[in-house]
Amino acid sequence: MFNIFKRNKDDENNEEVNGEENNQDSNKEQDEKIESKDQAKNIDKNESRENLEADVESAEILEDDSSKGFFGRLKEGLSKTRNSFVSKVSSIFSRTNIDDELYEELEETLIQADVGVRTTMELIDKMKAEVEEKEITEPEELYQSFQAEIKRILIADDEELPLATDWEGLKVLMVVGVNGAGKTTTIAKLANRYQDNGKKVLLAAGDTFRAGAIDQLKVWGNRLGVDVIAQSEGADAAAVAYDAVQAAKSRDVDLLIIDTAGRLHTQKNLMDELQKVRRVVGREAGEERVETLLVLDATTGQNALNQADLFNKSVDVDGVALTKLDGTARGGIVIAVRNELGLPIRLIGVGEAAEDLQDFKPEDFVEALFSDE
C-alpha cells in the first residue's frame, strides 16, 4: 500500500525533471510488480491459513456421546469389518462338518480381509492342530478356538500402553507415519486426552518438509490451548526437536509430543533424517523417557504392513496407532501387524470423536468384533 500511495503523489508532482520522472516511473513499475507479488503471496498465505483452519474445523475433536460407552463406540466403529469379514467367517463355521472346504473358504476370507498370507496360514495350521489334539468335530466349537487364537495373537505380552499410567518428569512421544494416515489428528486427540488428565502438554512441529504442516499443528495447538514449538518451513527437523526438548525441560512439561514429516517410507534420505531426529531426542531427553508411535491408516491394508516394517527398521517403533478402522471392512490388518511384525497395537481409531481414539484392549476388540448385533 505504501508504494501505491507514493505513486499517486508522484503523479501530482509535474515539476519533476523528465529524467527523474522516467527513473521514478521505472522504479514505480518495479515496485508495483514486487508489491503485486507480495500481495499475491499474502493472499495465498491467508487462503492457506483459512484452508488449514477449515480442515481442522472439519476434523474437530467432537464431544463424546457418553450414552454409548467405550465398548459401544468400539462395537459401532468395527461394524464394517464385523458385517463383512466376521459375518463371512461366522458363515463358514456354521456348516455341519469340518472338512477341507471349510479350511479353503476360511483361508480365502482371511486373505481378503488383509490378515496376510503368513498369518492366515498359521491360523489354518493352528485350527487343524486343534481339531486333532482336542478331537473337535463341531464347527461351532472350532469357531471358539479360532477367536481365542486371534485374541492370543493380539495380546502384547501384557505390555503397558504408552503413557497410559501416571509418571514423574518429562515423557516424549515421537509420532511418525506417512501423510494422510491421521497423524496430526491423533496428536491433537492425545494432547486433548492428557490435558484433561491434568498433564502439562507441549507440541513440537517437526514436520518442516510439508507445506502447511507447521501452521496446521499451530491451529490445533491454538484450539486446544497447547503451546507449539516451531521454526520456519524447511528448517532442520532435528533442531526443532532439540529446541522442543529444552523448552519442555524449562517449562516443567509432563508430555512432549513431536510431530514428524509424513515421509514416504521409500525415501532413504528422509528416513535417515528421521533417525537423526530420534537420536537427538533420545540424547537430550534420555532414552528411557522416549517412545515412538507409528500411525497407520487401516484402510490401506497390506501397504500399512509394509510401512510398519520399514519404519520399525528405521526408528525402532514402540507401538502402533491404527486409525480409520471405522472406515474399512477389512480390519484383519490389526492381526497382521501384531503377528507378522511383533509390534504391539497401542491405540485404535474407530471414529471422529476424541473418545474414539481408544487404548487397544485385545479382549474388548475380539468381543466387539465377533459379538452378535
Image (cartoon, grey):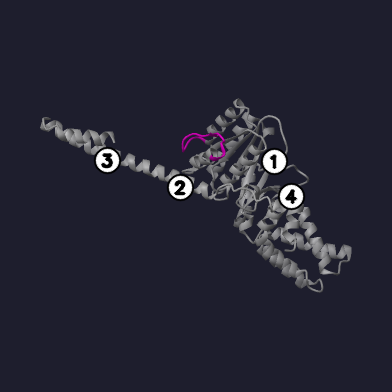
Characterize the local packing of mark 2: few (<14), some (14-19) or many (20 or more) Cα atoms within 10 angstroms. some
Where are the magenta residues, as a range? 223-236
- Disc 1 marks a residue whose amino acid type is Pro
Which residue has dot 4 on it? 361
Q: Earlier in the sequence, mark 1 or mark 3?
A: 3
Q: Quadrant of the C terminus?
A: bottom right
Characterize the local packing of mark 3: few (<14), some (14-19) or many (20 or more) Cα atoms within 10 angstroms. few
Asked if disc 4 and disc 3 are in contact, CB closer than 8 Å, the reply is no
Which residue has dot 1 on it? 162
- Disc 2 marks a residue whose amino acid type is Asn
Find the distance from the CA under tag 2 to the CA under tag 3: 26 Å
Decide if residue 107 is in sight here.
no
Residue 7 inside the magenta-drawn segment: no
Q: Earlier in the sequence, mark 4 or mark 3?
A: 3
What secondary structure is found at the residue carrying circle 4?
loop
Q: Earlier in the sequence, mark 1 or mark 4?
A: 1
- Main SS class of the magenta portion in the image: loop
- Which residue occupies the foreground of this view, 169 or 54? 54
Which residue has dot 2 on it? 51
Quarter of the image for residue 14 reads top left
Find the distance from the CA under tag 1 to the CA under tag 4: 13 Å
Characterize the local packing of mark 1: few (<14), some (14-19) or many (20 or more) Cα atoms within 10 angstroms. some
2 or 1: mark nearer the eye: 2
Q: Could you tell whether 123 is left or right of 40 in the image?
A: right
What number is the disc on residue 33?
Answer: 3
Residue 227 inside the magenta-drawn segment: yes
